[in-house]
Amino acid sequence: QKEVEQNSGPLSVPEGAIASLNCTYSDRGSQSFFWYRQYSGKSPELIMSIYSNGDKEDGRFTAQLNKASQYVSLLIRDSQPSDSATYLCAVNTRYSTLTFGKGTMLLVSP
Amino acid sequence: NAGVTQTPKFQVLKTGQSMTLQCAQDMNHNSMYWYRQDPGMGLRLIYYSASEGTTDKGEVPNGYNVSRLNKREFSLRLESAAPSQTSVYFCASSERGLDIQYFGAGTRLSVL
């Protein structure tokens, strides 16, 4: 049973548009939620962390968490070609560590 | 400040050979992790160390061993490499188990 699920994509958006990335998780006891960005051939880097229900904004990025629906999302406003990457959702589940989704590839076209 | 450093960056092994992947962090973090990443499979936890002196199995520990040498260093050993272990290996560290994890640059391993 998948614990953290993401649509693999690719999600294609034009430059300047809003990109919406979604993630669902199975463990109702999860407390920590993260979004990582991974460029091809590189290591994951943290974009956002969120721990409580609601929205959290950081520049062009907004993370949204709904624990009742077991859903976390990442919105990227004014998408740029440099945002083209794979976005990984991570949730704390078993082992008191993080479980990663398989990632959603985002393609932003000029 | 180097963060998390992994060596080597690339390695080619023959089936049955052994090797150790090294990882060191300079952020004074308590927890360290080893992941493998395969196409279409995402990041999968191999082993982790919640604190110096402890290690625990993750999702895919078979074929691997680890050593938490001290607070800074956490190594991953393949005793008898198999083609199924061809992957990209990432080391990560965090202040505590549920905190933000910081990743090394990765080791690209091919087993022929």
Image: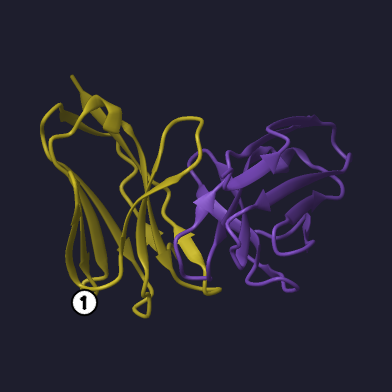
Chain colours: A yellow, B purple
Front position in the image: A76 or B12: A76
Q: Residue B91, percent across and down?
A: 62, 50
Determine crowd level at label 1: few under 14, some 14-19, many 20+ residues with C-alpha closer than 10 A. Answer: few
Give the image location of residue B81, x and y in percent: 82, 43
Name the residue rendered at 41%, 54% in the picture: A101
Dot 1: chain letter: A
Residue extending furthest front? Answer: B1
Q: Is residue B110 left or right of residue B105?
A: right
In this rendering, position of residue A14 left or right of residue B36: left
| Residue furthest to the top | A110
Q: Nearer the viewer, residue B22 or B35?
A: B22
> Is B87 located above or below residue B74 in the figure?
above
Q: Secondary structure at mark 1?
A: loop
Dot 1 amino acid type: Ala
- Report if residue A87 is visible in the image: yes
Quarter of the image holding residue B85? top right
- Quadrant including the C terminus of chain A: top left
Q: Is residue B59 visible?
A: no
**For this view, does A13 lie left or right of residue A40?**
left
